[in-house]
Image: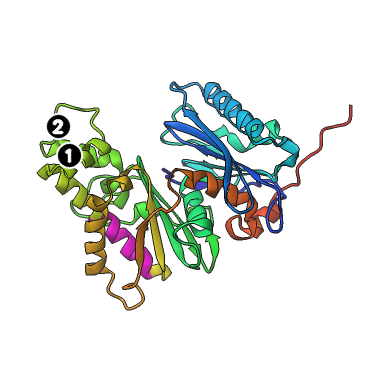
Amino acid sequence: MGDGVGGRVGDGAGGGVGDTRPALALDVGGTKLAAGVVDPGGRVVAWARTPTPAGLEPEPVWQALDALFTSVIQKSGLTEAELAGVGCGCGGPMEWPAGRVSPLNLPAWRGFPLRDRLAERLPGLPVRVHNDAICLAAAEHWRGAGRGHSNMMGVVVATGMGAGLILDGRLVSGASGNAGHVGHIVVDPDNGPVCRCGGRGCAEAIARGPALAKWARAQGWRPDQDDATARDLADDAAHGHPVALAAMRRAGRALGLAIASAAAVCDLEVVTVGGGVSQAGPLLFDPLAETLRTYARLPFTRHLQVVPVALGQSVGLVGAAALILCADRYWPESHAASMPPPTSPAPS
């Protein structure tokens, strides 16, 4: 998941309020690529996914993504000219809103000009690329568990831990696009593990999937299985393995502490949690809720709802489409206004 974005360049104009055309939505992950056509009501009308090519060369990943969204557009029965634009969610870090990406879970792309490549491939369409956690928050606010609430946060806990913030009904990006990085709220400064950011005791360093499995192996869980994953850990916890249960409680507590802090700062109504680690269900959410009861004690934080994402596997595509179809809420106007308009081909 996203570990940071930065920079200030433009993204393209167009799309947004009142547009009745569907959007092309892309979700770029370390293990799978997904593409879909999403209508203005948030319904995915055509979609497909494919495994992300392995290796360290950037072009095979781009070619797989290009082939995937080309087939989805054809499947939808639309032409490229009938689309409102292209929204894409991708892991970080990235330069935002320029869309130059270096996903931690996709080593083939380092400084890859994703937005520029999409704009070259689909000329004349606005192209907007944002962190995948931001897309989750936008999707859940628009059509998921945050619908009807003005102040919410969407959290992804998977290979990393990222989040997006919606305050007063609009996405908050911050000075460099990094607003909402709850994974780097420090929850155990004295005894917590060193984080990839260089700090110690960040929530992400405890709760992200690879860190969960590493900690559990050090405590005697499958010590000789370096390829054991957080999913394996959750399965063993469900069968009562004491170390696996302790690992899930530890992750739930770290997540709960981070959310409690964010709720106090931002006066949140709802937090939705997605990503692979969240699929552990009550094994994660029960200790999370217990932590909130202990630490979210201010009157305005006591009624905070923390729930799993409502949109399931479509959440990334719906959120990517929201960058285009609901730009007034999820693509800050100041950034959209700073973008150069799409260029027309030079006359021959």
Q: Which residue is mark 1?
A: 236
Figure quadrant of the C terminus:
top right
147, above or below 315, in the image? below
In percent of width and height, residue 186 lies at 29, 56
Determine the residue positioned at 23% across, 63% down: 291
- Tell which circle, 2 or 1, labels the residue nearer the N-terminal end: 2
Instruction: Look at the numbered disc 2 and give the secondary structure of its residue.
Output: loop
Q: CA distance from mark 2 to mark 1?
A: 10 Å
Q: Which residues are magenta?
A: 253-264
Report if residue 175 is visible in the image. yes
Picture quadrant where residue 54 is located:
top left
Instruction: Look at the numbered disc 1 and give the secondary structure of its residue.
Output: helix
Are dots 2 and 1 in contact, CB under 8 Å? yes
Q: Which mark is residue 222?
A: 2
Mark 2 neighbour density, 10 Å: few (under 14) some (14–19) many (20 or more): some
Q: Which mark is residue 50?
A: none
Tell me how many marks there are: 2
Mark 1 neighbour density, 10 Å: few (under 14) some (14–19) many (20 or more): some
